[in-house]
Amino acid sequence: MGYAHAPTGPMIMPVFMLALAACAVSRPFAGPGYDRERGVIAPDTGAMVVVALTNATLDGARRHTFDDHTRRVVDSLSSQPGFIGSSLRTRIFGNEVWTMTAWTSEEALDNFVASGVHQTAIENGMAPVRTARFARIKVARTALPLSWDRALEILETQGTGYAY
């Protein structure tokens, strides 16, 4: 009877790198309208909140442009009226990124999308984007934060996609 053996020697590194390439890391959900122990604490929040999800695949040679604008947008979030919280996710090795933001209302999200910082990011930071996917859903405030597994499922089943 034979036994299967784990890869050894020169095979370990390629197998390890292949496994790592599929991995992603995310920043924990946080924001001025969310407390880890109490949940949603934003004022003027009803039973339902709005969650916006995005996914983009980037041209790696120009990713820094996208990242610079993303940083500016993220830095502005806490000052946006109706913002509850967010989480960012990125593929460890690769050029795929995701965002999850939660808002007290559709109006608050629409105002953010129309804000100067977001419009500037769209106008100047989209050149590296090769594909994009967007979804917007209403969820019970008690459902926050969404797991990334659930967010990815929503993007896959309900998202609108674009190739640039």
Image: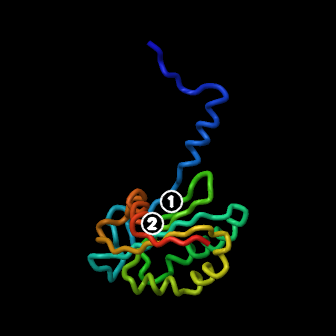
Are the two marked residues, 2 and 1, in contact with CB atoms closer than 8 angstroms? yes
Give whichever of 70, 96 is nearer the camera.
96
Report which residue position mark 2 lands on.
30
Q: Is residue 23 above or below residue 76?
A: above
Q: Of the numbered discs in the image, which one, if any, rests on residue 27?
A: 1
Which amino acid type is marked by label 1?
A: Arg
Asked whether, in this view, residue 47 is left or right of residue 22, the answer is left
Residue drawn at 59 percent across, 42 percent down: 18
Q: Is residue 30 above or below residue 81?
A: above
Rendered image quadrant of residue 123: bottom right
Type of amino acid under label 2: Ala
Residue at the spot x=69%, y=61% of the render? 60
Q: Secondary structure at mark 1?
A: loop
Real-space Cα separation, disc 2 to disc 1, in angstroms: 8 Å
Where is 48 relative to 150, above or below? below
Q: Secondary structure at mark 2?
A: loop
Instruction: Indicate the quadrant containing the N terminus: top left, top right, bottom left or bottom right.
Output: top left
x and y percent of residue 61 in the render?
73, 62
**Which image quarter is the C terminus in?**
bottom right
Outermost residue on the front side: it is: 163
Q: How is the image coloured?
A: rainbow
Q: Looking at the picture, how far across and down is residue 94, in whole percent?
A: 62, 55
Front-most of 51 and 47?
51
Residue extending farthest to the top is 1
Give the total number of marks visible in the rendering. 2
Image coordinates of residue 96 in percent, x first then y, are 58, 60
Nearest the eye: 34 or 100: 100
Residue 32 on image: x %, y %: 44, 73
Front-most of residues 67 and 62: 62
Left-right relation of 87 to 154: right
Graded by Cα atoms within 10 Å as few (under 14), some (14 to 19) or many (20 or more), the crowding at tag 2 reads: some
